[in-house]
């Protein structure tokens, strides 16, 4: 009987083991950019975070939003209480206004609030030959080392976004940056498909090249641009599922590198500082539509 009992226990264990061994399916980890709601107050935005499928919020300053300034105005403790009330986390901030070399105080604030990233742009002359651009990107990496070290010490990563009219703009500059920071903790890349040629194969190559240095991913396409006023249905073509960019291979590439960092469904309205749609509810509904589009492609 003892041997029979052991045999049955063994069979039972074998039957259960595959269920425990199976990995959870890969999915996007959504973060909400406060700028999607323009200059609406935190009290109105925070209840929307979970509705969008996001687990936390990232704060933007003027001119895109006012929530980063509002956090200071109401007090960090009050903001922490508001996050707790909604059961959501704090991701970090975007600080193009400070630039990549003046983030010491911001690193301390983001750490204090439990955040993990700060997005900024590159710095340096980009109106140069490709050969000189490569040199300038290398010089930028060297200048960023002490700032990255400080960020890493505080559990924060500085995400350098590729952006038009910026040192990190072209696909080559992104590759050089990724190569230069490969072994440097505390610095990564916030990849914005909007600011790249709308070529899915090219973007897939960049995602795979950036690999583990991907700090944040913007689900944001060019559509009809965000540089001028236009009818809302045209402006919204920056959102996944409304424009022409083929998102499926990009999502497959993110899965291939096992990207689990924050993904922000994103666009810029014109003028800056207004919600992407007139009300918080309409804005949330549009973000949810884009999320469902992306999730359906994944599934």
Image (cartoon, rainbow, N blue to C red):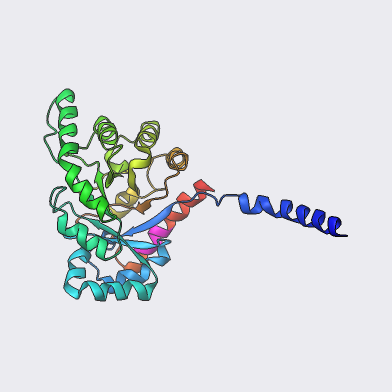
Horizontal arrangement in the rendering, residue 299 relative to residue 178 (left or right): right
Rendered location of residue 74, percent (x, y): 20, 75
Quadrant of residue 206 in the image?
top left
Taking the spot 17% from the left edge, 66% from the top edge, the residue there is: 69
Q: Quadrant of the N terminus?
A: bottom right
Main SS of residues in magenta: helix
Q: Nearer the viewer, residue 36 or 119?
A: 119
Taking the spot 19% from the left edge, 54% from the top edge, the residue there is: 95
Horizontal arrangement in the rendering, residue 155 relative to residue 289 (left or right): left
Rendered location of residue 6, percent (x, y): 80, 56
Taking the spot 32% from the left edge, 67% from the top edge, the residue there is: 280
Q: Which residues are magenta?
A: 283-288
Q: Nearer the viewer, residue 225 or 77?
A: 77
Q: Is residue 285 magenta?
A: yes
Q: Nearer the viewer, residue 111 or 127?
A: 111
Q: Is residue 102 magenta?
A: no
Residue occupying the far right of the picture: 1
Is residue 184 positioned above or below 20 on the image? above
Q: Nearer the viewer, residue 202 or 216?
A: 216
Rendered location of residue 171, percent (x, y): 28, 32
Is residue 271 positioned above or below 193 on the image? below
């Amino acid at each position: 009987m003892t041997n029979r009992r052991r045999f049955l226990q063994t069979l039972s264990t074998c039957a259960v083991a595959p269920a425990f061994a199976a990995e959870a399916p890969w999915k996007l980890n959504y973060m909400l950019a406060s700028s999607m709601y323009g200059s609406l107050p935190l009290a109105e935005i925070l209840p929307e975070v979970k509705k969008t499928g996001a687990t936390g919020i990232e704060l933007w300053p003027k001119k895109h939003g006012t929530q980063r300034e509002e956090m200071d105005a109401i007090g960090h403790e009050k903001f922490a209480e508001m996050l707790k009330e909604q059961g959501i986390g704090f991701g970090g901030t975007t600080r193009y206004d400070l630039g990549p070399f003046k983030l010491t105080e911001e690193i301390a604030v983001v750490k204090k609030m439990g955040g993990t990233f700060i997005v900024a742009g590159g710095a340096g002359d980009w109106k140069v030959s490709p050969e000189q651009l490569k040199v300038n990107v290398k010089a930028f990496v060297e200048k960023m080392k002490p700032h990255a070290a400080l960020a890493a010490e505080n559990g924060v990563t500085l995400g350098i976004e590729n952006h038009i009219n910026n040192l990190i703009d072209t696909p080559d500059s992104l590759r050089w940056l990724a190569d230069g920071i490969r072994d440097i903790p505390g610095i990564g890349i916030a990849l914005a498909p909007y600011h790249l040629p709308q070529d899915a194969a090219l973007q897939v190559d960049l995602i795979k090249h950036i690999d583990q240095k991907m700090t944040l991913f913007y689900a944001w396409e060019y559509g009809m641009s965000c540089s001028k006023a236009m009818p809302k249905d045209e402006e919204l073509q920056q959102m996944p599922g409304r424009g022409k960019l083929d998102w499926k291979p990009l999502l497959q590439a993110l899965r291939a590198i096992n990207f689990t960092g924050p993904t922000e469904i994103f666009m810029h309205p014109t003028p800056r500082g207004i919600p992407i749609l007139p009300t918080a509810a309409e804005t949330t509904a549009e973000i949810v539509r884009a999320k469902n589009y992306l999730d359906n492609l994944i599934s």
